[in-house]
Amino acid sequence: MSPSSSSMACFADGSLELQQAQVSEGAAVADEVMAALERNGVSFVGLAGKKDGKPRAGGAQGVGGARERAPQGRRRPRRGVSEQQRATDLFSEKVKRSPFSSSDKVLQLADEVECIFMKHFTGNDRKVAMKYLKPQQPRNTHMITFLVCSRALFGIFTSTGNSAYMEIVYHVFSMFALISLHIFLYGCNLFMWKNTRINHNFIFDFSSNTALTHRDAFLMSASIMCTVVAALVINLFLKNAGVAYANALPGALLLLSTGVLFCPFDIFYRSTRYCFMRVMRNIIFSPFYKVLMADFFMADQLTSQIPLLRHMEFTACYFMAGSFRTHPYETCTSGQQYKHLAYVISFLPYFWRALQCLRRYLEEGHDINQLANAGKYVSAMVAAAVRFKYAATPTPFWVWMVIISSSGATIYQLYWDFVKDWGFLNPKSKNRWLRNELILKNKSIYYVSMMLNLALRLAWTESVMKIHIGKVESRLLDFSLASLEIIRRGHWNFYRLENEHLNNVGKFRAVKTVPLPFRELETD
């Protein structure tokens, strides 16, 4: 035998002896730990009680002997769950440091087993193989907790029997809940736009340094909702305790939010707050400011927040008029002047949006599409006026007028959504009834989105159906319909910017300026 072969044999024998020693050491450590656990009352079901034909030190016999040796007058206390948990942690720590757990040889064998399994059972598809080889983690859901808490909250409102209390708190807390929902959906839009590489900052003319991210939007939404829930719970406790001026708490919440919005300090996303106020100024004074993408995009959001504007109207009436002292909430709901004001509130977002279309018609060389877009909002105003008249005089004539006007406005809006805003329903498109360029790979998502938008556009039919339910149930139904409209708007937002982004790319408008690699020098 050559020296090299003899050295290799010695090396192999040495490595084999080393591996056997490591395995023996690991087995000894494991037996020692398991024996200690068994002495502390932890049993291992299915394990043999003997090793090499001899009883284990910590087996059932050992434990029994220990119990026999214990004093007869003393009874061994039962071990608590915490002690068993500590013993389990100790066992896991010992096992993780054992050679059979940390050895590279074991990892190599595991890889070989995975390769054999993939070769013979999954056709070398690792993704499918891992579904079988990886341990399945139990899925924890909170659906039961959500349903129980929802039922308990519903029971709180229905068991009070005080409709005045419901009328007071409903408007304020619903207003903040709708704002939180809209911000959350905007965060979902930001997340999707980022993942699909839609350049929303360029489209809205936002600075990438100060623009909101989806995490910021989610944080704002969660903060608002947590504050609202905390204020609602405190208000319920104060109301049940009979504390005077308990209904002033929603007003304090409103003042706090107003103070945060107008806070001049560089906190709470000051750049975003100032941008929001600037856009709102441009919307209110639409004919006097150049209409940008962010302006009419925000105006479209307001058309879906008409219930929010009505809640703001009631809140302003209730707190500014001092009604919370005497609780005459009917003053802000039954008065004739406030009913007319409610119609004006419903009218304003469509009016502002129509003015923006007229301004763009004049600025963009008398584009006929802008006049047609303004006609869409005029039809929505007519439908709102007819529904307002029907609410005042519910006669069969006005029922048919509501159906005709609302149906016409809905068809107009659906056409504009699908054809103009989303770019769909193109008969010559290579993607059937869609557009040529699509960002999402799954085409069925677009068809489902079109059906969903159609269904949510028909929510106005509830006003004609005249469902007879209680006061609390009616408020919950109104809030649900308002939430569905906000969800529809958040769903609409993604496809609107997708179409705008594809138009920018097709017209080579991905950037406004090309930065040069030179530094600008200031001259005197």
Image (cartoon, grey):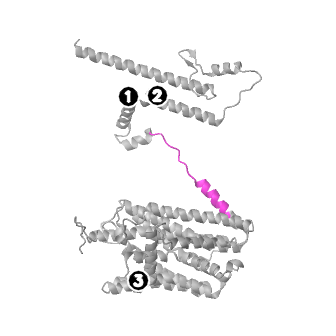
Q: Is residue 105 above or below residue 310?
A: above
From the image, tell me which residue sits under label 2.
98
From the image, tell me which residue sits under label 1.
105
Amino acid type, mark 1? Lys
Amino acid type, mark 3? Gln
Q: Marks 1 and 2: which is nearer the front?
A: 2
Amino acid type, mark 2? Ser
Residue 339 forms part of the magenta stretch? no
Q: Is residue 453 above or below residue 93?
A: below
Upstream in sequence: badge 1 or badge 2: 2
Badge 2: residue crowd in 10 Å (few <14, some 14–19, many ≥20): some
Position in image of residue 155 (x %, y %): 69, 63
From the image, tell me which residue sits under label 3.
356
Q: Marks 3 and 2: which is nearer the front?
A: 2
Residue 145 forms part of the magenta stretch? yes
**168 vs 322, nearest the viewer:** 322
Q: Residue at x 65, y 60 (%)?
A: 151
Position in image of residue 55 (x %, y %): 59, 17
Disc 3 from disc 2: Cα separation: 73 Å
For the question of whether residue 433 can be seen, the reply is no
Name the side, left or right, on which 54 lies relative to 158.
Answer: left
Upstream in sequence: badge 3 or badge 2: 2
What label does residue 69 carry, if any?
Answer: none
- The magenta segment is 134-154
Classify the position of the C terminus by image quarter.
Answer: bottom left
Position in image of residue 518 (x %, y %): 22, 66
Q: Residue at x 55, y 71 (%)?
A: 257
Q: Image quadrant of residue 480?
A: bottom right
Q: Image quadrant of residue 114?
A: top left
